[in-house]
Amino acid sequence: MSDYFISQISPKDKAASQQLDRLLTAEGIRRDGNLDYTCGMFDEDMNLIATGSCFGNTLRCLAVSSSHQGEGLMNQIMTHLMEIQVSRGNTHLFLYTKCSSARFFGDLGFYEIARIDGQVVFMENRRNGFSSYLQRLSGESGIHAPRERCAALVMNANPFTLGHLYLTERAAEENDTVHLFMVSEEASLVPFQVRRRLVMEGTAHLSNLIYHDSGPYIISSATFPSYFQKDMDAVIESHARLDLAIFAKIAAALGIRRRYVGEEPHSQVTGIYNRIMETELPKAGIQCTVIPRIQQNGAAISASTVRRAIKENQMELLPSLVPPSTLRYLLSEEAVPVLSRIRQAEDVVHY
């Protein structure tokens, strides 16, 4: 045991990367597409016997070779990863794991937020983390949250478009209060602080909105872990069901009775997500209202449409796709780095 050591695995280290993929495959998982740090525990012969990774404030791809299980190696991997996270300034940590492993991580100080039986458990290292989040949301709502016609929207707004505006106006018109959750993780081409500002500027004329940053509990499909799912459809389904399990708890705390979503006929991800939402939300007493997208020249207006227009330098299309506040931003000096990032991106369409 004293001959084992932990070391970072660089993406450039092909030999270690090959061992990593073999170990993960042997333990029934794949290397996740979103990782920013990976470590391995090696024996005296430089064989990889345990591994773990980070992405942002999450822990991922945790595995121990079957021939070394029961030796306490995962405890050491977890300790190492948590030290790395603390050095980065991340003390509130999250992980996704198989249901069969949840009790083990519970013994290491992680607490269950939500689970989808047979698929995934979402955990954090703070006993009262999620309950404190719900209390914060209630505090943001103040006295302006009637219990009857109370609805919710969740949007990434990358960037905020006329489609987002139409959806929000419909929800605001048909309800007394609308909780608008803005996905706050930094996984988009437009930074969160800009997205947040454009959402609030574009909807400033609506007096019955309550704005919430999503925090770490509502994440985008772009960063949902895929490493223990068999294929992309399974990843989308797990993400949708877990997201909805968490949302149902949020809705219960805030008295939300309806969730509005925009129809997305060309998006596989959104199509699967919406189908699951229409089935699962009513089980939690929440009506799911799907609003057809408004169109421009026969095509649905979406953030993908806007990003594609920017990438192809068709800026003349923007006034018909985004509200004036978003247009002002996109034509400003402030937006130059973001426009450059969009134009350099390999793919700007959300599938």
Image (cartoon, rainbow, N blue to C red):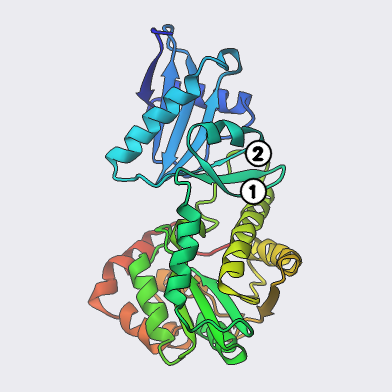
- Specify whether 23 is left or right of 213: right
Provide the residue designation for mark 2: 99
Residue at screen point 47% across, 51% down: 128
Q: Amino acid at mark 1?
A: Arg
Q: Does residue 69 lie above or below 285 as drawn?
A: above
Placement of the C terminus among the 4 image quadrants = bottom right
Could you tell me which secondary element the residue under label 1 belongs to?
A: strand
Could you tell me which secondary element the residue under label 2 belongs to?
A: helix
Q: Does residue 196 lie above or below 1 as drawn?
A: below
The answer to whether residue 316 of the structure is visible from this angle is no
Task: Return the x and y of residue 264 as percentages of the image width and height.
Answer: 64, 72
Residue 26: which disc?
none
Front-lying residue, 78 or 107: 107
Residue at screen point 29% across, 45% down: 89
- Tell me whether circle 1 and circle 2 mark residues in contact (CB < 8 Å): yes
Front-lying residue, 268 or 241: 241
* Outermost residue, left side: 333
Residue at screen point 55% across, 75% down: 153
Task: Return the x and y of residue 205 as percentages of the image width and height.
Answer: 43, 92
Task: Return the x and y of residue 186 as percentages of the image width and height.
Answer: 39, 58
Q: Amino acid at mark 2?
A: Cys
Q: Quadrant of residue 139?
A: bottom left
- Specify whether 30 is left or right of 265: left
Placement of the N terminus among the 4 image quadrants = top left
Provide the residue designation for mark 1: 115
Q: Does residue 179 lie above or below 228 as drawn?
A: below
Front-lying residue, 176 or 292: 176
The Cα–Cα distance between marks 1 and 2, rounded to whole angstroms, is: 8 Å
Q: Of the residues under marks 1 and 2, which one precedes in the sequence?
A: 2
